[in-house]
Amino acid sequence: MSMLAQPKYPISSHNQVGLRRPFIHRARVSCSATTTKPRSNANAKQVVVEPRLMPPPTVVTTANPNRPIANDPSLQSTWSHRAWVAAGCTTVAIALAESLKGAADLHMWFEPILAGWVGYILADLGSGIYHWGIDNYGDENTPIFGGQIEAFQGHHKWPWTITRRQFANNLHALARAVTFTVLPIDLVCHDPVVQAFVGVCSGCIMFSQQFHAWAHGTKSRLPPLVVALQEARVLVSRSQHAAHHQPPYNNNYCIVSGVWNEFLDNTRVFEVLEMFLYFKLGVRPRSWSEPNSEWTEEIEIPSQITAQ
Ligand SMILES: [Zn+2]
Ligand SMILES: [Zn+2]
């Protein structure tokens, strides 16, 4: 009788995305227990245990030298990032405070509230147009937008990084744009209706990257209020934004509330714009030739085997 003992190697199918645990090579040891026929000068039953060293299981890892790690310095906030976010929040707060003060002085509430709502709706449209533009055109050398273009290309390849990116690191680029745009308006305009529109619209645009990060979050790890707002479609939902990261990679660009996504995708607005720009300027959008390696999401492959 021959019996081959099966090694116990339950393989953890999912590693926590982004956590870089040390890769542990474990030797697989297989023992075969064999009973032999009794010999004249041997015991009636002899068990021979033959330990054999087997090669470690083959695990394919995504060895990419450019691949960020969970605590990558590029995901950390700097004091410069924090200063720009503070400046952006201040300019938005001034606009909202001016609007509230003007509305209270004039006993006029309907128009500022309506203007704020329009600002919220248009911020979603603006986020979609901007996202479409930097996803499809330019590169890291493009003036002004190069950093954002490079960051979004990296985001398509490693979407999980946005959940590890620190708050100010994620928002500083938009906060800087908001500061330069809204501060002059704060200084020259004191109309509560205009200020309500500007304050809400610019605030939603500045925080769109935070809404985007939450859209990549896990329900169990997000604050319950955020989950409730996502499910009420006040903020872009996780399921809607997930479609942006799946083939054909040319839809669901809006990242504030996502209210414009269905309309823009059904009417193929961006495809028409892409055709227009191609025939006018001869520039092809990235989405026509994707997915390629630049857009294909790298899948985190289990790099740890846990023996039980
Ligand atoms: Zn994108
Ligand atoms: Zn995303």
Image (cartoon, rainbow, N blue to C red):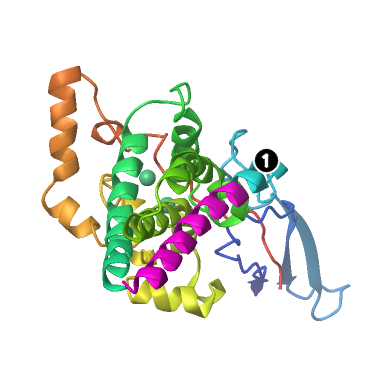
Return the residue nearer the eye: 176 or 150: 176
Q: Quadrant of residue 232?
A: bottom left
Left/right placement of residue 15 relative to residue 35 reads: left
Label 1: element kind? helix
- In the rendered image, residue 201 lying in the magenta stretch gets the answer no
> Residue 182: x percent and y percent?
45, 45
Q: Residue furthest front?
A: 105
Q: Tell whether circle 1 marks a residue whose Cβ is less than 8 angstroms from ligand 2.
A: no
Relative vertical location of residue 105 with respect to residue 128 in this rendering, above or below: below
For residue 256, say whether it is visible.
no
Give the number of callouts. Answer: 1
Sort mark 1 into few (<14), some (14-19) or many (20+) by Cα contacts within 10 Å.
few
Return the residue nearer the eye: 202 or 168: 202
* First to last magenta residue range: 85-108
Q: Amino acid at mark 1?
A: Ser
Relative vertical location of residue 302 with respect to residue 250 in this rendering, above or below: below
- In the rendered image, residue 92 lying in the magenta stretch gets the answer yes
Q: Which residue has dot 1 on it?
A: 80
> Residue 8: x percent and y percent?
66, 70
Position of the N terminus by quadrant: bottom right
Position of the C terminus by quadrant: bottom right
Q: Residue at x 35, y 58 (%)?
A: 241
